[in-house]
Amino acid sequence: MPELRTDRLLLRRWRESDLEPWAAMNADPEVREHLGDLLTREQSDAVVADMQAVFDERGFGWWALEARETGEFIGRVGLDQVGKDLPFAGIDIGWRLTRSAWGHGYATEAALTCMAFGFETLGLPEVVASTTVNNLRSQAVMRRIGMTRDPADDFEDPSVPEGPLRQCVLYRAPAEVLTAYTRRDATVDTARTVHKRTDPAPR
């Protein structure tokens, strides 16, 4: 699993020490507001094991997210294949942060770094992102990283029971979106090879 760095963040492999704060996130009603039921510690640990296995198999997936200044685990960010039960296909970009990490621009900064990896390293032509229609905070991040929404693409998630979490919005970003930003220096370090590139100033 390659490590991705920005001035403030480290996107890295999961560690045993991440399991407790990750489980606390998944037991936090505010963090899970647009995601569904709270997870038990056993369920939360199983998610990490699955994320690591998928990343090793595909070469991309979900990174643990760390604040470089403190070394604190603050969530996850990554790329994933869209589920076969959804009415669209492609590679999905997503993020989930601890409540204490909200409001600092970390989601935008991490997502842009992850997006650049997808476009520049994996050669993806496009990434997509989806969330519930009421998750305005996440939709704001999608717009900040250059994604756009066509209401015609909005959909109902068939895996979710009837209710406020079923109606979802879809955002898209082509590879060309990276050229629309004034970006700051960052590095991607994989197999001892450092690829210099730039990221936008954090919001």
Image (cartoon, grey):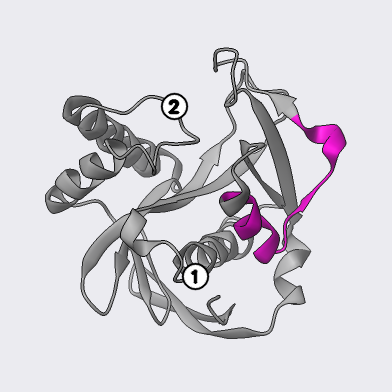
**Residue drawn at (21%, 71%), measured in percent from left and top?**
71
In the depicted structure, whether residue 135 falls above or below residue 98: above
Out of 198 and 25, give the one closest to the viewer: 25
**Residue 89: which disc?**
none
Q: Are marks 1 and 2 in contact (CB under 8 Å)?
A: no
Out of 126 and 165, give the one closest to the viewer: 165
Which residue is identified by label 2?
A: 36
**Residue drawn at (62%, 49%), measured in percent from left and top?**
136
Which residue is identified by label 1?
A: 105
Packing grade of label 2 (10 A; few <14, some 14-19, many >=20) is: some
Residue 126 at x, y percent in the picture: 71, 51
Residue 173 at x, y percent in the picture: 73, 54
Q: Secondary structure at mark 2?
A: loop
Residue 69 at x, y percent in the picture: 26, 80
In the rendered structure, which amino acid carries the disc numbered 1? Gly
Q: Which corner quadrant of the image does residue 197 belong to?
A: bottom right
Q: Secondary structure at mark 1?
A: loop
In the depicted structure, whether residue 197 falls above or below residue 24: below
Q: Which corner quadrant of the image does residue 187 belong to?
A: bottom left
Q: Please indicate, yes or no, whether residue 181 appears anywhere in the rendered image.
A: yes
Q: Please indicate, yes or no, whether residue 123 appears anywhere in the rendered image.
A: no
3D distance between C-alphas at marks 1 and 2: 24 Å
Asked if residue 192 is among those painted magenta in the image, a careful observer would answer: no
**Residue drawn at (52%, 67%), measured in percent from left and top?**
113
In the rendered structure, which amino acid carries the disc numbered 2? Gly
The magenta region covers: 138-154
In the picture, the quarter occupied by the N terminus is: bottom left
In the picture, the quarter occupied by the C terminus is: bottom right
Residue 120 at x, y percent in the picture: 61, 65
Relative to residue 80, is residue 130 drawn left or right? right
**Residue drawn at (49%, 70%), measured in percent from left and top?**
105
